[in-house]
Amino acid sequence: MNIAIIGTGNVGGALATKWAAAGHSIRLGVRDTSQFKGKALLGNPNTEACSVAEAVAASEVVLVSTPAMHAVEVAQSLGDTSGKIIIDAMNIVMGRGPQGFQNTADAILAHTSTRDVVKCFNTTGYNNMANPEYGGMALDLFVAGDSERGKAVAMQLARDAGFAECYDIGGNDRFTLMEQFAFFWINLAMFKGMGREIGFKLLMR
């Protein structure tokens, strides 16, 4: 799969590494290909750096993992997104997000041509993306969006990153719930002092 990653920090970097190792072709969309955060990712297999628009044009899937306050600016920089799947891994935290939107996925939808926007990879820390295993058991992820095509791809990419399952929690009307769930993890990890080495697993009987 050809994947563009916009935002090469902790989350984008962890997923770029896992997906490259799984055999996907990774294009890091950056402003300056000679100097950018996460440049060491070019040491991964199947990975190159190019402009944001070039990365998107050459890819079927676009992961957006930039700070939430830049969601509109980033969405507008993607170029023609017709037919592309966009996976939104961002969260509005403590009110820091795109003005006029309750969640970042709605901001992306409002400023791109694709309807295949889903929210995933936002409900846990980057450390859990680098290593989702706890005691021989892998963590779970969750995905939301109206796009069945987009959700199917996100679920596959979650498994390719080493997660056990990725559960569908609903459509676009669940975007804000996904961000609230992310804040639940952030609250425990940061504000309650439990640390980043925690994660969620859905158990059934």
Image (cartoon, rainbow, N blue to C red):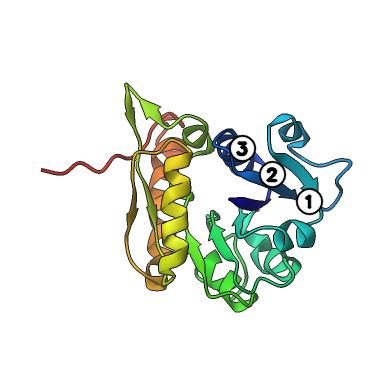
Q: Is residue 65 visible?
A: no
The amino acid pointed to by label 2 is Thr
Q: Quadrant of the C terminus?
A: top left
Q: Residues within 10 Å of mark 1 (few under 14, many from 20)?
A: many
Residue highlighted by disc 3:
20
Spatial CA distance of label 2 from label 3 is 14 Å
Find residue 133 and report its image quarter. top left
From the top left corner, tell me how far across and down residue 140 is, in percent.
35, 42
Q: Residues within 10 Å of mark 2 (few under 14, many from 20)?
A: many
Spatial CA distance of label 3 from label 1 is 17 Å
Q: Is residue 79 visible?
A: yes
Residue highlighted by disc 2:
8
Residue at 79% x, 45% y: name it.
Answer: 49
Find residue 55 and report its image quarter. bottom right
Which residue occupies the foreground of this view, 183 or 165?
165
User: What is the number of the mark on residue 30?
Assistant: 1
Of the two numbered discs 2 and 3 in the rendering, the one whose residue sits closer to the viewer: 3
